[in-house]
């Protein structure tokens, strides 16, 4: 059995300490310990009250997520909680650290709660496709009212101790050691003869909302907007609605139990829990030991203050790391820093930041046009034009000024990191740090190891990702790394499909329905169609040499339709709007291009559009695994969800592929190979092998 609960007597108080490192989830041994401890305390006449706390940094991190979907041993959690709730002796929770999910629900079964100021409490179940299924949907509304409870449960975000007190979740904030404070609180209860306070019996806060349909309508509208295609929010709303309208606690608990079971069975739950464990798994690199020494990053240098450089700079400033940003001339520098300031000012206007915070962050920023000023940085990241010769020259300059031990990084989105490393005398310090645009917002950081990158440089870069509140995934050094290599297959197919008969709007709509935040043509409009067009012109490419999938985009550029920036691209954007409208002229242009290329257009159904966009991407993912560019399938899932907007509820492309059945995918790939030929439809040997062996991508995780 996993975990335990220590029991000790402190005079007339039974102190129970949950011990299940590192974060005390409610595993079998903990449930057993809770059950036994409560019985022991109730049967001991010396005990007048019980204090429950956690060992280490957490109170309780929630139910043991790894037990979901399998058989679990030991007493059931609900039995333990019912025994606590019914206890005739008061139980005081001493919330010493994280109390999440089932952990907070345990605290809500206690009769009182004393909290450490730094302890976060939250009900993050919605993020795992679940709902608080240990009474949270029934007790919290009784404690703080339905509206606040709904907001708290639907956001899943934690709040610190003092806020928990202000909201009514905690009774007191400890002014010192939280266990001592809880013991003192319990002794006060005993001396005052205070009755046991059971939240289940409190109905006052609910009465005000009885029959208030508007409250739940609003919650449903918000959830549909913020959590598109999620199953759990509606289940949560129904539970809180039951708490309010049924009035009876046990009747509400029955609704909670039914809806929790529905969530537990739902595929989204499995996918989201896969994401939870994958996010932690990607930090583990088999050939870089966990205890590899890392260096502190206290100061950063960024070369280039355009869109990417500016965003990277903000990522550092946002976590309090000073940055020196370099531009070629003062005008470009002023422009870049102006954009950073404007971005922060917008945050102030939206009430997300204060003026003081903006000043603090801008105070950490130094602009320069001199490389020498980058000399004290612990990491220097170049974000210059995406051209290997320009990058190589930049690395030569970087290494001249960088202090010994500094990390020299490139924000390239797919160029050869080894070529940059070879331009220096310290290739062990060179690494790719591929941020995604907007770099201050996007969670993904692709960390690209070169042939000679040292373990220390890798470990420090992975740690830096965490420091910047990003999810770092390690990639090997091959064109396009993990994400852009897969993306190329996806956009290529989208380009082919429209020439064969679909419209850009049909393709985008299919992917939107799948759950992507935007389709490939909306993405092209956002990024700017002119980028590829200009690069092709610069390379002196003749019109007939332009890949056929880029022909329509290039024609749009000739008409000065560059995408959102010119209010016209594949879509028309009414002034000031980012919602594009379909344009019949573009459909004509696509049809004309098909005719020029001698392609007979035909009806392509939505199912084919989806398969043709996603299957080559998955096939390429298999090749990436085979080439050792990604360590595990889950690394690809994390890259695609956090860098490219692949819907989280699918668990990522490789997890999703397993659920579709790899044999089905391979059969379709072979069908399209016969129809269309080309490299994209050449089945990856790994995919063929897995199908032949009846295995899944997940089987590679070990
Ligand atoms: C729930 O409670 C349902 C109930 O309402 C109803 C029940 C009937 N279980 O994140 P870290 C592991 S649903 C099992 O690196 P941190 C984690 O995998 C649950 N394992 O540390 C990792 O393992 P490893 C609601 C868990 O300090 C290690 O602990 N609760 C659990 O950065 C360290 O984790 C949640 O959703 C768990 N519940 O962050 C909370 N939690 O070292 C989920 C963690 O082998 N947890 N592990 O890779 C978290 O948000 C963070 O882990 C926490 C610590 C903030 C607690």
Image: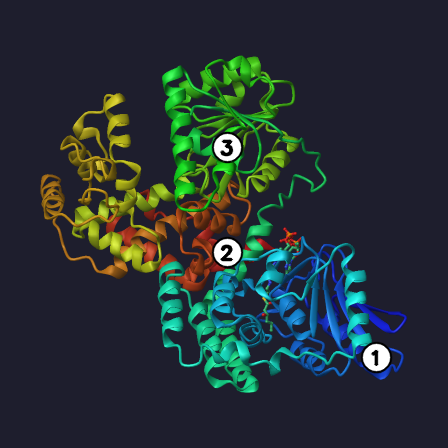
The quarter of the rendered structure image containing the N terminus is bottom right
Front-most of 507 and 160?
160
Q: In the drawing, does residue 685 fall left or right of residue 53?
A: left
Q: Is residue 464 above or below residue 198?
A: above
- In the displayed structure, would residue 503 be above or below residue 354? below
From this view, report whether residue 588 is shown above or below residue 447: below
Q: Residue at x 42, y 31 (%)?
A: 340
Earlier-in-chain disc, 1 versus 2:
1
Q: Is residue 558 visible?
A: yes
Colour scheme used in the picture?
rainbow
Q: Kindly identify which residue carries mark 2.
A: 697
Query: Whole-percent x and y of residue 215?
Result: 40, 71
Residue 614 percent coordinates (x, y): 35, 53
Q: Nearer the viewer, residue 351 or 387?
A: 351
Q: Nearer the viewer, residue 285 or 186?
A: 186
Element marked by disc 2: helix
Instruction: Say which of marks 1 and 3 sits in front.
Output: 3
Q: Is mark 2 within 8 Å of ligand 1?
A: no
Q: Are marks 1 and 2 in contact (CB under 8 Å)?
A: no
Whether 81 is drawn above or below 462: the answer is below
- How many numbered discs, if any? 3
* SS state under label 3: helix
Q: Residue furthest front?
A: 192
x, y percentage for residue 530?
A: 24, 31
Residue placed under numbered mark 1 in the picture = 40
The residue lying at 28 percent from left, 31 percent from top is: 531
Q: How far is disc 1 from disc 3 in space, using C-alphas?
A: 57 Å
Disc 1/disc 2 C-alpha distance (Å): 48 Å
Mark linked to residue 316: none
Front of the two marks 1 and 2: 1
Q: Decide which of tag 3 and tag 2 comes sooner along the chain.
A: 3
Checking the image for residue 359, the label placed there is 3
């Amino acid at each position: 059995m996993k975990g335990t609960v220590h029991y000790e007597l402190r005079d007339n108080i039974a102190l129970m300490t949950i011990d299940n490192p590192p974060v005390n989830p409610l595993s079998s041994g903990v449930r057993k310990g809770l059950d036994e401890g409560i019985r022991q305390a109730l049967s001991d006449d010396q005990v007048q009250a019980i204090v429950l706390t956690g060992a280490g940094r957490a109170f309780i991190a929630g139910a043991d997520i790894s037990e979901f979907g399998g058989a679990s041993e030991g007493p059931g959690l609900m039995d333990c909680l019912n025994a606590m709730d019914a206890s005739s002796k008061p139980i005081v929770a001493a919330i010493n650290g994280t109390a999440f999910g089932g952990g907070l629900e345990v605290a809500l079964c206690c009769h009182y709660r004393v909290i450490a100021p730094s302890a976060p409490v939250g009900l993050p179940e919605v993020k795992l496709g679940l709902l608080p299924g240990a009474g949270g949907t029934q007790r919290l509304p009784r404690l703080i009212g339905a509206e606040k409870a709904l907001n708290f449960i639907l956001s899943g975000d934690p709040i610190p101790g003092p806020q928990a007190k202000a909201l009514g979740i905690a009774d007191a904030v400890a002014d010192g050691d939280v266990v001592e404070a809880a013991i003192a609180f319990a002794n006060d209860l005993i001396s005052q003869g205070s009755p046991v306070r059971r939240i289940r019996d409190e109905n006052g806060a609910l009465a005000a909302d009885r029959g208030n349909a508007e409250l739940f309508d609003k919650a449903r509208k918000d959830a549909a907007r913020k959590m598109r295609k999620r199953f759990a929010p509606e289940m949560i709303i129904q539970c809180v609605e039951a708490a309010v309208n049924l009035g009876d606690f046990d009747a509400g608990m029955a609704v909670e139990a039914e809806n929790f079971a529905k969530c537990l069975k739902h595929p989204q739950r499995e996918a989201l829990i896969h994401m939870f464990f994958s996010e932690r798994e990607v930090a583990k690199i088999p050939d870089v030991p966990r205890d590899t020494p890392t260096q502190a990053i206290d100061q950063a240098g960024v070369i280039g203050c355009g869109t990417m450089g500016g965003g990277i700079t903000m990522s550092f400033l946002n976590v309090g790391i000073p940055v020196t940003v370099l531009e070629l001339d003062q005008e470009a520098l002023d422009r870049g820093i102006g954009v950073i300031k404007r971005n922060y000012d917008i945050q102030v206007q939206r009430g997300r930041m204060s003026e003081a915070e903006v000043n603090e962050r801008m105070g950490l920023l130094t602009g320069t046009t001199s490389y020498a000023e980058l000399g004290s940085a612990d990491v220097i990241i170049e974000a210059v034009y995406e051209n290997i010769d320009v990058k190589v020259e930049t690395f030569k300059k970087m290494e001249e000024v960088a202090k010994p031990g500094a990390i020299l990084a490139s924000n390239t989105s797919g160029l050869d990191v080894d070529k940059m490393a070879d331009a220096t005398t310290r290739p062990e310090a060179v690494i790719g740090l591929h941020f995604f645009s907007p770099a201050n917002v996007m969670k993904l950081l692709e960390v690209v190891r070169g042939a000679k990158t040292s373990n220390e440089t890798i470990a420090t870069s992975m740690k830096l990702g965490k420091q910047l509140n990003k999810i770092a995934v390690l990639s090997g050094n091959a064109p396009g790394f993990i994400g852009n290599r897969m993306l190329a297959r996806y956009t290529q197919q989208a380009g082919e499909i429209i020439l064969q008969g679909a419209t850009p709007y049909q393709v985008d709509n299919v992917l939107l329905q799948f759950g992507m935040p935007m389709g490939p043509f909306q993405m092209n409009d956002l990024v700017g169609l002119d980028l590829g067009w200009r690069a092709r012109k610069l390379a002196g490419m003749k019109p007939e040499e332009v890949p056929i999938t880029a022909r329509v985009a290039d024609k749009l550029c000739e008409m000065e339709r560059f995408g959102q920036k010119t209010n016209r691209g594949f879509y028309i954007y009414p002034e000031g709007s980012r919602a594009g409208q379909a344009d019949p002229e573009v459909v004509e242009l696509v049809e004309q291009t098909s005719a020029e290329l001698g392609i007979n257009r035909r009806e392509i159904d939505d199912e084919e559009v989806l398969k043709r966009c996603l299957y080559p991407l998955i096939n390429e993912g298999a090749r990436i695994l085979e080439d050792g560019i990604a360590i595990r399938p889950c690394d690809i899932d994390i890259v695609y969800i956090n860098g490219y907007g692949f819907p989280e509820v699918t668990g990522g492309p490789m997890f999703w592929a397993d659920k579709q059945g790899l044999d089905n995918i391979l059969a379709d790939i072979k069908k399209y190979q016969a129809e269309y030929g080309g490299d994209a439809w050449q089945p990856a040997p790994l995919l063929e092998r897995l199908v032949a062996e009846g295995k899944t991508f997940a089987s590679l995780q070990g």
